[in-house]
Amino acid sequence: MTRRTRLAPSPTGALHLGNARTFLVNWALARQRGWRILLRIEDLDGPRVKPQARSGVARTLEWLGLDWDEGPLVQSDDLAPYRGAMERLAREGKAFPCALTRAQIARAASAPQEGAHELRYAAQLRPASWERRFEDGCANWRFCVPPGEVPFHDGVQGLRSFDPSRIVGDFILWTKRGVPSYQLAVVVDDHRQGITDVVRGEDLLDSASRQLLLYRALGLSPEPSYWHLPLIIGPDGKRLAKRHGGRTIDAYREAGAAPEEVVGLAASWCGVGGGGKLSAREFLAAFDLARLPREPIVFTPGS
Ligand code: GLU
């Protein structure tokens, strides 16, 4: 069986250096091991997506020197596969419509969750009964998360395990805006696109347990292997992002930098090279997963 991976950028603005590192490693692992690579544009994630960023993101990856075998596939082009999965979960009583507001969910939570991106939705908040028929666009639909640990083997981190019922509870599958959530869309796509290996940043590590629960609820197999890479963080300890100072990949390009400078910097975070210039091809030849640092890497923009 040919193994397959995907580069899955969200066009929520320009890609930054942390994304460059993740895509380079994903690409190099695939090319070294003979996996096929699919480019998937994940543009469903709410109002943050900028339409002009859809094509820009592929151009940015090409500028870095990356290539792929299939795609780009764009999630928003066809919602039918996600709707089919949603209808099935609703029909089987594994998902329910949620009428509660964010404030109501926050009030019901036992621990204070101010500012949390995703509130924990305790199973006790589920409605006493509901119609097992999916209706689009009227409410958020949530997954009935079964309690318990969901362990998995991670190619970078070894054995990991999370209990989604304790971390996020009944997470959202479909929003009242009429689009699937990231968690549902990624599982439907990874399955139908034959993805065997998911390589991404460690910020999504605990999502792997959520996604495995969805594979099982939908009766999908085989489940993919996961490879979660240590985060690149800013001096404030948070994941490297635009707020750390305009260092997007496009900002480097517009300032006249060569792709080899960006690749060289990202490579130095992967135990490859000394931070000097490097092409994507040279990175591919030198990359060794065993030398990838396992701890988060602090990057101070401008240093
Ligand atoms: N689109 C996600 C991101 O850019 C990646 C999702 C995934 O790899 O599962 O962070």
Image (cartoon, rainbow, N blue to C red):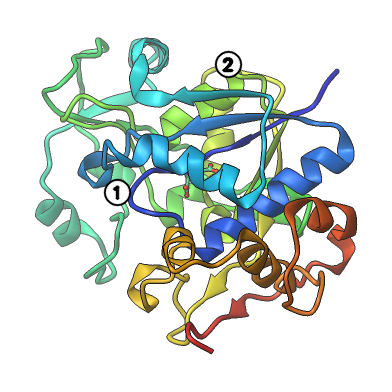
> Which comes sooner in the sequence, label 2 or label 1?
1
| Residue at figure coordinates x 54%, y 89% from the top left | 303
Q: Nearer the viewer, residue 152 or 149?
A: 152
- Give the left or right position of residue 59, taking residue 288 as reference: left
Query: Which one is nearer the viewer's eye here, 269 or 283?
Result: 283
Q: Determine the residue located farthest toward the front in the rendered image.
A: 256
Q: Could you tell me which residue is drawn at 29 percent across and 48 percent down?
A: 121
Q: Is residue 168 visible?
A: yes
Left of 176 or right of it: where is 92? Answer: right
Quick check: marks 2 and 1 in contact, CB under 8 Å?
A: no
Q: Position of residue 111 (x, y in %)?
A: 29, 69
Q: Is residue 148 visible?
A: no
Placement of 260 over or under 197, stated as above or below: below
Q: Amino acid at mark 1?
A: Tyr
Residue at 27% across / 12% down in the picture?
A: 132
Q: Which percent across, then down, holds residue 96?
A: 27, 26
Task: Tell which of 202 and 22 is nearer to you.
Answer: 22
Tell me the tag on residue 147.
none
Would residue 143 appear left or right of 264 to someone viewing this image? left
Residue 229 vs 231, above or below: the answer is above
Q: Where does the image place residue 299, in percent across and percent down from the top left?
A: 55, 81
